[in-house]
Amino acid sequence: MMRKYGPEIAANLERAEASIQAAKDLVTGGYNDFAASRAYYAAFYAATAILLCEELEFSKHSGVIANIHREFVKTGRLDKRHGKDLNWLFELRGVGDYGATIHVTQQDAEKAIKGAEEFLRAMKDLIQEEDK
């Protein structure tokens, strides 16, 4: 099926994959704050991709997150745990990017990567379902 935002959807999914790989590289190097941030961005890009499938565009993170909940979690198209993971990743990214004296632990950074991978997989599954 030809999509209005086909190239943008593909680019966001590629960025999500690259962000997960970057997060893994960063956590291996001990850069847990930055790994958590990249993990969140992987989920953000994946969320942006699925919203573009619905021809919904948002310039703010809050818009993307709110609309994932409105369009997918509340309608039952997406498991609630993925919505919770997206919220948690966003909060953890705040610690990683802006926490002056608090830092992301290695355990949380690794959990963030796992959550982002699962979120991305769920978004890809939804996109494939929509393509059928």
Image (tube, grey):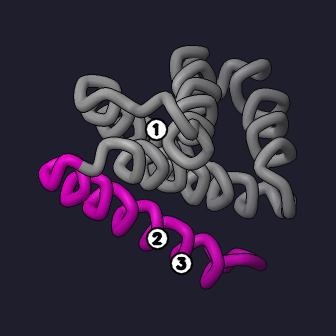
The C terminus - image quarter? bottom right
Q: Residue furthest front?
A: 101
Q: Are marks 2 and 1 in contact (CB under 8 Å)?
A: no
Mark-to-mark CA distance, 3 and 2 = 6 Å
Of the image marks 1 and 3, the number of the one nearer the N terminus: 3
Camera-nearest label, 3 or 2: 2
Name the chief secondary structure element in magenta: helix
Query: Residue at (79%, 55%) from the top-left corner?
Result: 54
Is 116 placed left or right of 85 in the picture?
A: left
Q: Amino acid at mark 3?
A: Ala
- Disc ID at residue 11: 3
Horizontal and vertical percent position of residue 119: 46, 38
Residue at 13% x, 50% y: name it.
28
The label number, if any, that marks residue 74 in the structure image: none
Residue 23: percent from left, percent from top: 31, 54
Q: Is residue 97 magenta?
A: no
The answer for how far apart the CA atoms under marks 1 and 3 are is 17 Å
Q: Nearer the viewer, residue 18 or 72?
A: 18
Q: From this viewpoint, is residue 125 visible? A: no
- In the rendered image, residue 12, in percent from the top left (x then y), is placed at 55, 69
Residue 15 is labelled as 2
Q: Residue at x 58, y 59 (%)?
A: 45
Q: As drawn, which residue projects farthest toward the bottom?
A: 7
Look at the image and give the residue range highlighted in magenta: 1-30
| Figure check: 20 above or below 76 | below
Q: Amino acid at mark 2?
A: Arg
Hey, what amino acid is under mark 1? Phe
Question: In terms of sequence position, does the residue under pointer 2 or pointer 1 come before the other?
Answer: 2
User: Toward the viewer: 122 or 64?
Assistant: 64
